[in-house]
């Protein structure tokens, strides 16, 4: 009987090691997967707000001349870039039409547990547009 116990001595160690590594991998995916989601939400929020800041600037010369309201391209892009700078994010700003501002933002977050296996950061990119809407419309009573 002693011979049998000696032959199996230490056989639990490889199973324990595999279990612990697998458990840490799943914990890393859960914790750092949440960081990826947070980065995505942050990127979308910042991109939407920057696009809104740019789309709200009307070309006043065109409006006063009686032409249709359009986004002031230079002022709109500058306002969107200013919002990005103030929020501490980098991104690109452009026009997607005479009444539409497009903003792209990339957010990078550090990882906690996945950094142990060489993944030190996660990134998320959001691309949004905002349209200039003029006037107020509502249903007549």
Image: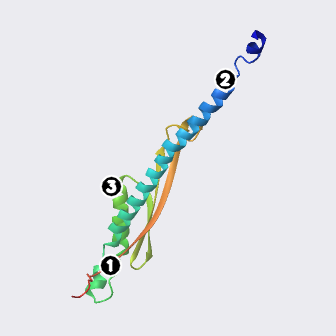
Q: Do tag 2 and tag 3 residues touch (Cβ < 8 Å)?
A: no
Q: Do tag 3 and tag 1 residues touch (Cβ < 8 Å)?
A: no
Q: Do tag 1 and tag 2 residues touch (Cβ < 8 Å)?
A: no
* Disc number placed over residue 13 in the picture, else none: 2
**Residue topped by disc 3:** 86
28 with respect to 46 (left or right): right
| Front tag of 2 and 3 | 2
- On screen, 82 above or below 19? below
| Front tag of 3 and 1 | 1
For label 2, the crowd category at 10 Å Cα-Cα, with few meaning under 14, some 14 to 19 and many 20 or more, is few
**Residue topped by disc 1:** 133
Element on which disc 1 rests: loop
Instruction: Say which quarter of the image contains residue 5.
Output: top right
140 with respect to 38 (left or right): left
> x%, y% of residue 127?
47, 64
Element on which disc 2 rests: helix
State the quadrant of the C terminus. Answer: bottom left
Element on which disc 3 rests: helix
| Residue at the extreme left | 141
Question: At x 77% / y 16%, what residue is drawn?
Answer: 7
């Amino acid at each position: 009987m002693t011979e049998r116990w000696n032959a199996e001595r230490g056989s639990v160690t490889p199973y324990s090691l595999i279990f612990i590594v697998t458990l840490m991998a799943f914990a890393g995916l859960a914790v750092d997967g949440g960081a990826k989601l947070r980065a995505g939400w942050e990127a979308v929020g910042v991109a939407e707000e920057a696009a809104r800041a740019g789309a709200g600037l009307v070309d006043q010369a065109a409006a006063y001349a009686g032409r249709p309201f359009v986004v002031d391209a230079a002022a709109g892009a500058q306002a969107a870039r200013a919002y990005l700078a103030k929020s501490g994010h980098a991104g690109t700003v452009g026009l997607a039409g005479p009444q539409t501002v497009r903003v792209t933002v990339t957010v990078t977050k550090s990882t906690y547990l996945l950094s142990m296996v060489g993944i030190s950061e996660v990134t998320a990119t959001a691309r949004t547009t905002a349209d200039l809407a003029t006037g107020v419309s509502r249903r007549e009573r």
